[in-house]
């Protein structure tokens, strides 16, 4: 992923370092600062999570960092360094990494893939962009391996299908396979479980953790679900109104939050009561 000739002196374990990063959006009502001077870093094999309610700026942070926001509508400032190389200083710099060591799992598996192209054609295109495999047979073989890696059964049959023929959970696994085509050092997972039921969510999270354990991939997780954050994170940044209002280790954020906003997020997580409590609720409804 890194270019030794372009690296500056930095910790060899540091994959991503974001400093004073801001995103200003041009709207009909004027300039809106959607992300306001955030700072975070990710080391090899680490999972860092940005959590907050809808509209807090967490996905805008990720999309801005990857420079996937419309350039005529978004103004980016600060620094975004990948292995010490600032990819924000040049519009073309990020292209060396996207799909070639830096990959995105986008929101909503039901709409993220092209409906008119087969699963196989979209996966093979990602493999071509990564540029690690040459020749039709090698590309096809890697497509098969990737679907097997994300535990999709009957691979040859699935490659021929179109997105509407697969369930949400299967589509999410396809999106992960496409992201893995570049053998990424950094995987940005933008709400990877939000459109899935609880059982499927657990399978996807297990898969991501397994990939991280076997390959040392770093993960930037974007989620509104503090339960997900607690399970997968080393560090959690709590975002409100475009700012980080609290940051710390996953255990500290969940067990001893310092900010009222974080406590409110935790309080919003549904919890099962005791049998006696459930009976009391039922009796009060009568």
Image (spheres, rainbow, N blue to C red):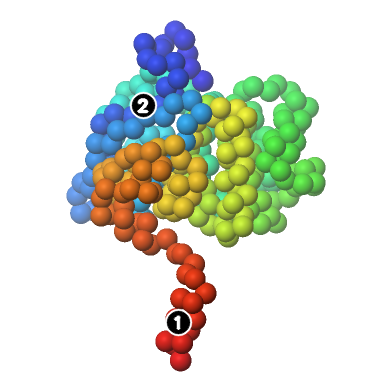
**In the figure, 219 relative to 89: above or below?**
below
Identify residue for label 2.
Answer: 17
Q: Is residue 9 left or right of residue 180?
A: left
Residue 87 is situated, as x and y percent measured from the top left of the image, at 38, 24
Question: Is 165 rendered above or below residue 70?
Answer: below
In this rendered view, identify the residue nearer to me: 89 or 58: 58
Q: Quarter-wise, where is residue 93 in the image? A: top left
Q: Is residue 2 above or below residue 247?
A: above
User: In this rendering, would 262 be left or right of 272?
Assistant: left
Q: CA distance from mark 1 to mark 2?
A: 51 Å
**Residue nearest the observer in this picture, 229 or 6:** 229
Q: Is residue 137 visible?
A: yes
The answer to which image quadrant residue 24 occupies is top left
Q: Residues within 10 Å of mark 2 (few under 14, many from 20)?
A: some
Which tag, 1 or 2, sits closer to the chain's start?
2
Residue at 63% x, 49% y: name it: 203
Number of residue marks: 2
View extreme (front): residue:
276
Tell me residue 214's x, y (percent): 62, 30
């Amino acid at each position: 992923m890194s270019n030794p000739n372009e690296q500056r002196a930095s910790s060899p374990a540091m994959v991503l370092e974001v400093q004073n990063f801001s995103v200003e959006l041009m709207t009909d009502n004027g300039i809106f600062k959607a992300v306001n001077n955030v700072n975070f870093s990710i080391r090899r094999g680490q999972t860092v999570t940005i959590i907050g309610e809808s509209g807090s700026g967490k996905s805008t942070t990720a999309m801005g960092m990857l420079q996937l926001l419309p350039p005529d509508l978004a103004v980016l400032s600060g620094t975004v360094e990948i292995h010490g190389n600032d990819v924000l200083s040049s519009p073309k710099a990020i292209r060396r990494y996207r799909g070639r060591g830096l990959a995105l799992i986008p929101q909503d598996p039901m709409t993220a893939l092209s409906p008119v192209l087969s699963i196989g054609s979209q996966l093979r295109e990602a493999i071509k962009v990564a540029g690690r495999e040459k020749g039709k047979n090698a590309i096809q073989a890697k497509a098969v391996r990737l679907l097997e890696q994300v535990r999709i059964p009957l691979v040859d049959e699935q490659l021929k299908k179109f997105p509407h023929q697969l369930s949400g959970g299967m589509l999410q696994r396809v999106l992960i396979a496409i992201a893995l085509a570049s053998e990424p050092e950094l995987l940005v997972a933008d709400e990877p479980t939000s459109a899935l039921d609880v059982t499927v969510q657990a399978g996807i999270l297990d898969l991501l953790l397994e990939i991280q354990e076997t390959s040392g991939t770093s993960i930037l997780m974007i989620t509104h679900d503090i339960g997900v954050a607690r399970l997968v994170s080393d560090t959690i940044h709590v975002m409100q109104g475009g700012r980080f209002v609290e940051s710390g280790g996953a255990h500290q954020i969940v067990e001893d939050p310092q900010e009222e906003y974080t406590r409110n997020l935790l309080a919003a997580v549904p919890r099962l009561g005791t049998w006696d409590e459930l009976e009391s609720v039922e009796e009060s409804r009568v």
